[in-house]
Image (spheres, coloured by chain):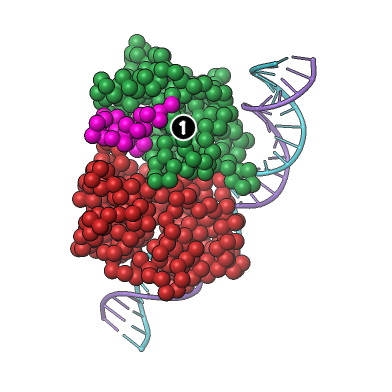
Chain colours: A green, B red, C purple, D cyan
Amino acid sequence: MSPGAGAPRMVDRKPHDLLWRRLSSFAPLSDQERSIVRQTCAAPGEVRAGTELYVEGERLAKPGALLAGWACRLRLLADGRRQIFDFLLPGDLFGHPTGAEPLATTSAVTLTAVSIASTGCLFEMVREPDRFPGLARAWAAAQARQEACLLNHVVRLGRQTAYERIAHLLVELGHRLDEIGFSLGSFVPMPLTQEVMADALGLSVVHVNRTLQQLRRERLIEMKAASLRLIEPDVLAAVADFRLPRGAPSAG
Amino acid sequence: MSPGAGAPRMVDRKPHDLLWRRLSSFAPLSDQERSIVRQTCAAPGEVRAGTELYVEGERLAKPGALLAGWACRLRLLADGRRQIFDFLLPGDLFGHPTGAEPLATTSAVTLTAVSIASTGCLFEMVREPDRFPGLARAWAAAQARQEACLLNHVVRLGRQTAYERIAHLLVELGHRLDEIGFSLGSFVPMPLTQEVMADALGLSVVHVNRTLQQLRRERLIEMKAASLRLIEPDVLAAVADFRLPRGAPSAG
DNA sequence: CGACATATTGATGGTAGTCAAACCTGGTGG
DNA sequence: CCACCAGGTTTGACTACCATCAATATGTCG
């Protein structure tokens, strides 16, 4: 499941290695493609926690990739309720128009300090699958992956209890972190406040708190600072009916 | 919002006109593209209600488009709970692999008798955006549309009450039906059982029943056989905080 | 230290789930 | 034509999960 202790970790390397390694795990890249991706990451931008990357309805003009830090996509309701759709982790792409209209269907906000590669030129390349087949395939796979997570999220929200939702989300995030070099059974970064988890999982902060306590009491998870350890990933996956997305890239 | 009473309705025409009209509403098609799409719909397949179009995990081999009838995408949990992700209406595409791996991430089941065009060859064409630019753009827009509906669904499930969820779903379906030729303020087909709505909205059948009654009592909707009328679409949209998806095709 | 965000705890109430039964409705067949 | 049945809808009684409100810790940062 995880690389051995000595295996290279994407996140340990220079940020500008992270993206091409991540894309390569979706589909093999040519040397040319790889070097272009690396160039893209040469001068990442840095933004603070709480920054809006883009806002619902706005024209998507600055597509990017996260090289470090976390963000999320969300929508605000008229009365202030907030729904988080998914989380963006290092190596994830954001802000790329999908349909004909390049208008954002969600907002996106950073949850931590974040460093960002601007991927405008990569996005141009993806439009020419003949010249850049590896990149195009990796891109499509990355999108498919994001959609798979969204489907998981719908299941959590629609048909799972608070206990199951939290277990499911933590296992999913654990696996995603595993893919980028953290090992599933050990402490991994988890910079989500309980309020953020609540807004993602459709629960109240109070109930998230109590449910997390239950998971800790049962010795299924362990929390420390802004990090988390899944003590029993298999038990958690079982109670949450978690399924590994098919076609998932293997870590390392 | 809707075409006048005398305007042509996509669904009134021969099924084999529906698809190209629908795709044209996303992006203009060349004469060649249009005629190919029409040919695709020449000999639709017919299947009964309750047929599985494909099953989660299976290799997607028979991509298609709905020419008549309704279907849905769903997932079953280990203990029998069921979550419906979205509904497929006439003119919608299904079963097209998105990422590298052509494995279904959901199952899909027909809700009514359905007629289907096999779109394997169209799907090949979409891979060559240089030769078929209109089709490629329409395809991308159709996908974007589907994703927009999925985002709406997450909001419903995560942050809305039963009352809001149902209102929101009905308005969304109303608008989608409006796009394919029914008019928003009049009776439109609505072949969903309360159980299906419950499995889509993360509610129990009983509660769906009671909430629908409330909407009827308040004279916001009217139901008859397998059809529905939104008496006050604006009020419903307001209580549900419904937003028209940007870049939506206009009906007619 | 004080200001602020986040986490925790307790008490109470409401929304929605569960269980169970009755009631339609359309279709089938004797 | 009516009995019968299956699937869907409706109703009632009861329960429980989770939201809400409010107050108190804990922690972090200038």
**Residue B67 colored in magenta in the image:** no
Subunit that carries the residue with mark 1: A
- Position of B90 relative to B95 (above/below): below
B225 vs A210, nearest the viewer: B225
Residue A223 visible from this viewpoint: no
Q: Residue at x 50, y 63 (%)?
A: B1
Q: Residue sitting at 59 percent across and 33 percent down? A: A195
Tag 1 residue: A62
Residue drawn 41% across and 71% down? B7
> Residue B11 lies in what quarter of the image?
bottom left
Horizontal side, residue A120 vs residue A193: left or right: left
Residue A7 at what x, y percent from top left?
A: 33, 13
Image height check: is A96 above or below D11? above
Q: Position of residue B93 (x, y in %)?
A: 32, 53
Residues in magenta?
Answer: A118-145
Question: From where the camera sits, is residue B209 visible?
Answer: yes
Q: Residue at x 50, y 29 (%)?
A: A71
Figure quadrant of residue D14: bottom right
Q: Looking at the figure, which quarter contains the C terminus of chain A? A: top left
Mark 1 neighbour density, 10 Å: few (under 14) some (14–19) many (20 or more)? some
The residue type indicated by label 1 comes to: Lys
Secondary element type, mark 1? loop
Q: Nearer the viewer, residue A139 or B53?
A: A139
Please provide percent x and percent y for residue A173: 44, 29
Whether residue A119 is in magenta: the answer is yes
Which part of the image, by quadrant, shows the N terminus of chain A? top left
Task: Report whether B199 appears left or right of B140.
Answer: right
Magenta stretch, overall SS: helix
